[in-house]
Image: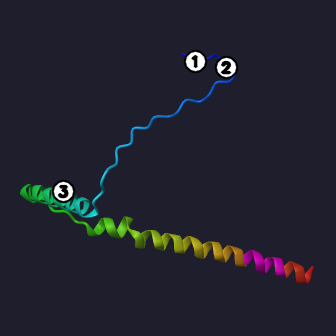
């Protein structure tokens, strides 16, 4: 039992830290095994997996093209505003 005080002192925090080991090779192996299992199950049912459509539609190149298109439109708008500003500056 302690003495009464005017200030409340913070108590120490107790953390339960359990370190985990991460193995990239094991993760890649587990991912590959699960892909093979699903592929085998789908082949048993007579279905196939087409991976190429997902990569083309949602992949890096699709997003890259959208970003470049937006960038080009933005550049054209900025150029038009600058040309109009220069025109008004010179002739008015």
Residue annotated with mark 1: 2
In this rendering, the label closer to the viewer, 2 or 1: 1
Looking at the image, residue 88 sits to the left or right of residue 72; the answer is right
Classify residue 17 by image quadrant.
Answer: top left
Residue 52 is situated, as x and y percent measured from the top left of the image, at 27, 70
User: Residue 5's mark?
Assistant: 2
Residue at 47%, 73% (x, y): give it. Answer: 65
- Residue at the extreme left: 44
Q: Earlier in the sequence, mark 1 or mark 3?
A: 1
Assess whether mark 2 and mark 3 are in contact (beta carbons under 8 angstroms): no
User: Residue 82's mark?
Assistant: none
In this rendering, the label closer to the viewer, 3 or 2: 2
Of residues 76 and 27, which is closer to you in this image? 27
* Cα gap from disc 2 to disc 1, whole angstroms: 9 Å
Q: Which residues are magenta?
A: 80-86
Asked if the magenta segment contains residue 71, the reply would be: no
Seen in the picture, residue 77 relative to 27 is either above or below; the reply is below
Q: Secondary structure at mark 2?
A: loop
The quadrant in which the C terminus is found is: bottom right
Residue at 65%, 76% (x, y): give it. Answer: 75
Residue at 29%, 67% (x, y): give it. Answer: 53
* Cα gap from disc 1 to disc 3, whole angstroms: 59 Å
């Amino acid at each position: 039992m302690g003495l009464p005080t005017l200030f409340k002192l913070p108590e120490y925090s107790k953390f339960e830290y359990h370190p985990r080991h991460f193995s990239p090779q094991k993760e890649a192996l587990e991912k590959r095994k699960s892909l093979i299992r699903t592929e085998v199950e789908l082949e048993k049912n007579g279905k196939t997996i087409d991976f190429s459509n997902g990569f083309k539609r949602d992949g890096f190149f699709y997003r890259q093209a959208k970003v470049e298109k937006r960038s080009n439109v933005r550049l054209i708008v900025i150029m038009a505003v600058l040309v109009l500003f220069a025109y008004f500056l010179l002739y008015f």
